[in-house]
Amino acid sequence: MDRRRRLLAVVLALGGIVLGATPSRAAVLDVSWTAPTETADGNPLADLASYRLYYGPSPSCPSQNFIQIASPTPSPEPNQVVRFRITGLSSGTLYYVSVTALNMGGVESACSIGASAVAQLDFSVSPTSSVYFGSVNVGSFADKIFTVQNTRGGTISGSASASPPFSVVAGSPFTLVGDGASQAVKVRFAPTTSIATVSTNIGFTTDGDTISRLATGAAAVSEPTINIVLPTSDSTYRTDSPVISLGGTASDAVGVRGVMWINDRGAIGTAVGTTSWSAGGIGLHPGTNVLTVAVENFAGYIATATLTVTLSVVSAFTGDSEITAGAPVKAIHFAELRDAINTIRVACGLPLFRWTDATIVPGATIKAIHLAELRIALNDAYVSTGRTPPTYTDPTVAAGVIVKGIHLNELRSGILALQ
């Protein structure tokens, strides 16, 4: 080309040192040259358009492997230095570089004298090996810190990325200005399912280059625990009160979400507190009540504890277990039956019965109406619990009926049968 210009009085300067690492992507070469100022015939250069930067693992200029770089000015000043960073190279690999210049008409100069250097990383990531996050309970998390550092000077910008159940929670994106500038990047492992182990690559990318670190973690299931300590730490409890309070403790490595209770006889509620909890005002039905308390952790796992409570309305009645034929029916017998039946009614969610002659004192006359009310009040309790009321002797109690021992024995048996 007779119009080829002496566009390059070029000395290439390539930054690079051997890192001793296994070749990988994410390496760069910093190239600089002195811009041409004259044409081949010695006239001032006024139409410089661009440069072609040829590079490869062997000397080759011109070739198909080049980068087109626009000239900052068509008329460079003397000793003006042009700089460019080649990215996406393999670290530890020797590269050869040459430069040509092109004018506005597309005429290309001869190749500059070549230069060579080993590509190196423009940033580093530590730790330099794989990272184990440990065994982490489902619903909890563990964090690890990675440090990204500028190793070539200038300004580099980038970001970090990870795949679930790993995530980058701090330090990304980042901009590192100057050699040695660094940024801490926090990565979190937060398993949501009980998998044995999971691994992923944490990617750190700058200028199109990526350094990866293998991250591994194990997921563990956190099992909560719960204990009942009040009114007893035993598995069974007997009481004559129709209302009971429970209390205890709960624990979990992840954290206790809440505690609830349920009575198998048909009631449910929420306890107050978490690691130390209490539940009051739990109504009991006559007989056996299986009370279950359940704790849930933040991972959704549940543990339970049970207490079997027996509500005994009365443990015994005054006098013989049975009132024998001919034995006198006493006021105290009626008073005991009234108290026992009202306790049962409260336990069944029924109101207290309003008795005729509310107070029966010793020597008072026992009337048919007194016996009839006892049967009505007890039958209400049976119906409320879905049970069939007892069968009574002399089912119709009319005025003038003599109250006998058998009548009271049937009521006593009916009361005890509900316990």
Image (tube, rainbow, N blue to C red):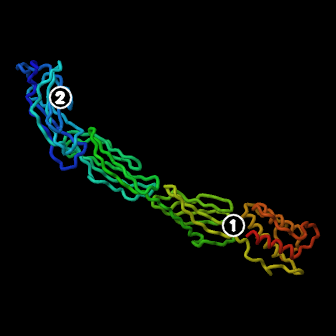
Q: Is residue 256 left or right of residue 408?
A: left
| Percent coordinates x, y for residue 335 in the rendering | 80, 72
Amino acid type of the residue that numbered disc 2 sits on in the rendered structure: Arg
Q: Is residue 37 left or right of residue 258?
A: left
Q: Position of residue 208 (x, y in %)?
A: 28, 38
Task: Report the mark closest to the observer, 1 or 2.
Answer: 2
Q: Secondary structure at mark 2?
A: strand
Q: Which mark is residue 242?
A: 1
Q: Which mark is residue 52?
A: 2
- Foreground pick, 134 / 93: 93
Q: Is residue 392 left or right of residue 252?
A: right
Instruction: Tell me which amino acid carries mark 1.
Output: Pro
In the rendered image, the quadrant that contains the C terminus is: bottom right
Q: Is residue 33 left or right of residue 406?
A: left
Name the spot of residue 6 as percent of width and height, x first: 8, 24
Q: Position of residue 346 (x, y in %)?
A: 73, 64
